Image (cartoon, rainbow, N blue to C red):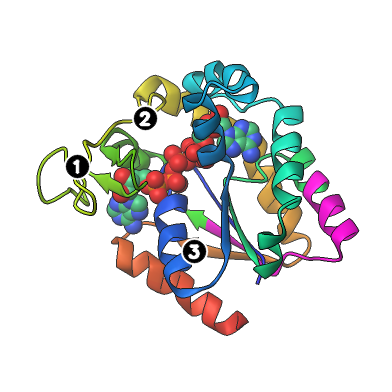
C-alpha cells in the first residue's frame, strides 16, 4: 500500500502514522521529521530550512524536491510508504506523480484529517516530544506518566520551536492557501478519504483503520 496522510498542523498526522505503522508494514516518510533532523545536524539543508520552519512557513520547493528524490533512491520504499506532511503544495503533488510514474508506482489512498482550526491550539501548544525515541505526548490530552519524562525511554521531553501561537497562525495560513488545493487535486482522482480528526486518539485511529482494512 502507498498512502498519504494530510491535515492541518496538529491534526494528528504523526500520532496516527505511529499507530498505522504498528499494524501495517510501511515505510514512514515525514518531511517535517527529515527537515528537523537536518536542522539538528546542521547540514546545508538544515541551515537553509531552519528559519522558514521557525516562522511556520513552507520550506522552498527545491529543498523538498531534493530530499524526496533522495528518499526514493532507497529501496526500502518498495515495501509501501506512508507519506506524512508531503505533498503540501500542488507543485509537490505533481512532482510526486512524476516520480511515481517513472517508478511504475501509484498512490492507493489519501487520508485527510479534518479538524477545526480552534481545536489545534491545545494540540500544538500542549505537544511535547521525546528527542530520543520520537514518542509524541500532549500535556492536555496525552500526558506522560512522569511530568517532562518519556514513558518509553526516560529521556527529557522537549517542545518544538514552531509550537507557539505566532508560528501556528502562519502554519495554518500556509495550510489553507497551499495544502487545501492538494486535497482537491487528489479528490479529482477519487483518492481522498476524509476522516474526522476530533475525538480521542484511539477513536480517530479506529476510523482510519476501517478505511485501511477496506483497502487490504
Ligand atoms: P511538520 O512536522 O509536517 O508539521 P505540521 O504539518 O505543522 O504538523 P505537526 O507535526 O505539527 O502536527 P501533526 O499533524 O503531526 O500532529 P501530531 O500527531 O504531532 O512540518 C513542520 C515544518 O516543516 C513546516 O511548517 C514547514 O516549515 C516544513 N515542512 C515540512 N514538510 C514540508 C513540505 N512538504 N514542504 C514545505 N515545507 C515543509 O499531534 C499534535 C498533538 O496533538 C500531539 O501533542 C498529540 O499527542 C495530540 N493529538 C494527536 N491526535 C490527538 C487526538 N485524536 N486527540 C487528542 N490529542 C491528539
Name the quadrant of the C terminus. Answer: bottom right
Q: Is residue 205 magenta?
A: no
- Image spot of residue 176 (x, y percent): 58, 37
Question: SS at mark 2?
Answer: loop
Q: Is residue 87 left or right of residue 34?
A: right
- Mark 2–mark 3 CB contact (< 8 Å): no
Return the residue at label 1.
139
| Residue at x 38% of width, y 65% of height | 204
| Distance between mark 2 and mark 3 Cα atoms | 26 Å
| Residue at x 63% of width, y 44% of height | 180
Question: SS at mark 3?
Answer: strand
Above/below status of 204 relative to 127: below
Return the residue at label 3.
195
- Image spot of residue 61 (x, y percent): 74, 30
**Disc number for residue 160:** 2
Can you tell which of label 1 and label 2 is closer to the viewer?
A: 2
Can you tell which of label 3 and label 1 is closer to the viewer?
A: 1
Q: Where's ligand 1: which quadrant? A: top left
Mark 2 sits near ligand 1, with its Cβ under 8 Å away: yes
Can you tell which of label 2 and label 3 is closer to the viewer?
A: 2
Name the quadrant of the N terminus. Answer: bottom right
Q: Of 205 and 100, which appears nearest the observer?
A: 100
Above/below status of 28 relative to 170: below
Q: Of 122 and 102, which appears nearest the observer?
A: 102
Q: Which corner quadrant of the image does residue 3 belong to?
A: bottom right
Which region shows up in magenta? 95-112
Around disc 3, counting alpha carbons within 10 Å, would you say few (fewer than 14), some (14 to 19), or many (20 or more)? some
Q: Mark 1 or mark 2, which has the lower sequence index? A: 1
Q: Which corner quadrant of the image does residue 152 belong to?
A: bottom left
Tag count = 3
- Mark 3–mark 1 CB contact (< 8 Å): no
Amino acid at each position: 500500500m502507498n498512502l498519504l496522510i494530510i491535515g492541518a498542523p496538529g491534526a494528528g498526522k504523526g500520532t496516527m502514522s505511529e499507530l498505522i505503522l504498528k499494524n501495517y508494514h510501511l515505510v514512514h516518510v515525514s518531511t517535517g521529521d527529515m527537515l528537523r533532523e537536518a536542522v539538528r545536524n546542521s547540514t546545508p539543508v538544515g541551515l537553509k530550512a531552519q528559519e522558514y520552519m521557525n516562522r511556520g512557513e513552507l520550506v522552498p520547493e527545491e529543498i523538498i524536491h531534493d530530499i524526496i528524490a533522495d528518499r526514493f533512491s532507497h529501496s526500502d520504499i518498495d515495501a509501501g510508504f506512508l507519506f506524512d506532511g508531503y505533498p503540501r503544495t500542488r507543485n509537490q503533488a505533481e512532482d510526486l506523480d512524476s516520480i511515481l510514474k517513472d517508478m511504475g508506482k501509484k498512490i492507493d489512498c489519501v487520508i485527510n484529517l479534518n479538524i477545526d482550526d480552534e481545536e489545534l491550539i491545545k494540540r500544538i501548544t500542549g505537544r511535547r516530544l521525546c528527542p530520543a525515541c520520537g514518542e509524541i505526548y500532549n500535556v492536555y490530552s496525552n500526558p506522560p506518566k512522569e511530568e517532562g519524562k518519556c514513558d518509553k525511554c526516560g529521556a527529557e521531553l522537549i517542545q518544538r520551536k514552531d509550537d507557539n501561537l505566532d508560528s501556528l497562525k502562519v502554519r495554518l495560513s500556509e495550510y489553507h492557501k497551499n495544502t487545501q488545493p492538494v486535497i482537491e487535486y487528489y479528490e479529482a482522482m477519487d483518492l481522498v478519504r476524509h476522516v474526522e480528526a476530533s475525538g480521542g486518539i484511539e477513536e480517530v485511529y479506529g476510523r482510519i483503520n476501517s478505511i485501511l482494512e477496506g483497502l487490504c
